[in-house]
Amino acid sequence: MFVPKSEIITKLSANVPRYTSYPTAPNFSPDLGPQLVEKMHASIDNGGALSIYIHIPYCDRLCWFCGCHTKQTKSYIPISYYVETLLEEIELHRKALAHSPEVAHIHFGGGSPSMLKSEDFNELSKKLRTSFRVTEKTEISVEIDPNDMSDDMLVGLQKIGITRASIGVQDFDPDVQEAINRPQTFEQTRDLIEELRSINISSINVDALYGLPRQDMNRLNNTLEKVISLSPDRVAMFGYAHVPWLKKHQNMINDQELPNIEQRHQQADFADQFLTSSGLQKIGIDHYATPEDSLTKALNEGTLHRNFQGYTTDQCNNLLGLGASSINQYDGGFIQNTVPTKQYKAQISEGKFAANRGYELTQDDRIRGYVIERLMCDFSFNFDDVAIKFGDTGTPIIETAKSVVLQDSDDLCWIGNGKFNVSADKRAFTRIVASKFDAYLSKQNSKFSKPI
């Protein structure tokens, strides 16, 4: 039965997770993290290559749209002390590990990691390279706010060996920028990207948003035209997540200036058509990449993954999270570091890991997590693959898939050729389909963002 998108948009507007992990972070248990650290280190010792995420929770200006764990500072002093704590945390992990694991990926996120001075980038680089095996094959990426642009920052990026830069754009329209407290000219962004390419950074990603206050189709079109003119290797086109109950600074945004759910969908559709017609390949629900990019190759080879940084080529079972609020992922579960920076620093300075909330995976979690990740990456999962990977324990999820299709009155999904599939014209609703396999969603009180 054909169901118009407009009807589904109105009907299916409940907030759902973004599914960068399963179970999602609200299901982590308080104070369980310390009990899991030893298991995490054992997993790293036995798990081959490792990925590292380093969180820098500082900005020199608080953008009102931001959903990250960050705080504003006009002084570099707290950042300098924070870097010292990061170095201590790396040392704690080095001592706890039986060997020095190879590192496949390092990602600096925030906040604004581009606020770091070159000397601090250099110190972190040296500590990482003496504690782990960072090789010429290691991908090293950093999130950059063009407002932090400086010659010193470029020197720091060179010292640490950055291979990929992610540039925050959001929207180039001055009126939209005013509404989200994010002033940033196109010329400023263009000049930064030229500087990055001059120091041989091989891949440039641009982050943009739809669903912002005062944003309309004309302004979105103008922004996307400018984004494409920068010739990025990747574009992340996210829907703005308005969650003021979680991020109090989002109360600075006027709710009346936000597009409604149907307008958000129109913007998402327009951005999708614009970016794909510009020669980029759609990756999952919100990423785009050139045909030559490694994300596109991973998609075509069936090896695309999704983690806390979004879509990735990262094949590692273990992700070591460093810094306040960072999440560690290992073969057996998740550990989140303490969120408040003061408490995080105190724990590390006492020679303790900053592990706080945690979750230990069950077999059912592994199966559901696998299915949800494949839906988010491939918009389908193969019943035979589930059987091969999980044996008889995978049978219940196949029965769940059949039940989901039988109860689907909106033509969101179907079964064919031994696969559960999201309908090609309803892929914008993939998070809703994925939520049908989430055993915890109906049991928790957390509020999530809009599904589109």
Image (cartoon, helix red, strand yellow):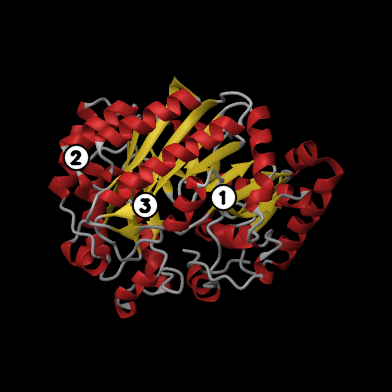
Picture quadrant where residue 121 is located: top left
Q: Is residue 441 left or right of residue 265?
A: right
Q: Is residue 135 visible?
A: yes
Residue 107 drawn at (x, y percent): 42, 38
Identify residue for label 2: 192
State whether residue 324 appears in this view.
Answer: no
Q: Position of residue 64 (x, y in %)?
A: 31, 66
- Which residue is rendered at x = 34% and y = 26% of the image? 161
Identity of the amino acid at label 1? Met
Q: Quadrant of the N terminus?
A: bottom right
Residue matched to label 3? 273
Q: Secondary structure at mark 3?
A: helix
What residue lies at 54% left-to-right and 45% top-to-bottom?
A: 307
- Between disc 3 and disc 2, the foreground one is 2
Mark 2: give few (<14), some (14-19) or many (20+) Cα within 10 Å.
Answer: many
Nearer to the camera, 367 or 421: 367
Residue hosting label 1: 376
Residue 97 sits in quarter: top right
201 relative to 103 in the view: left or right: left
Do residues under tags 1 and 2 come within 8 Å of each other at their CB atoms? no
Q: Please name the amino acid that badge 3 sits on.
A: Gln
Dot 1 crowding, Cα within 10 Å, few <14, some 14–19, many 20+: many
Q: CA distance from mark 1 to mark 2?
A: 32 Å
Which numbered disc, 3 or 1, marks the residue closer to the eye? 1
Mark 2: amino acid: Leu
From the viewer's perspective, is residue 147 above or below residue 162?
below
Distance from the alpha carbon under mark 3 to that under mark 1 = 19 Å
Nearest the camera: 420 or 50?
50
Crowding at mark 3 (Cα within 10 Å: few <14, some 14-19, many 20+)? few
Does the CB distance between marks 3 and 1 fall below 8 Å? Answer: no
Q: Residue 291 at what x, y percent from top left?
A: 40, 32
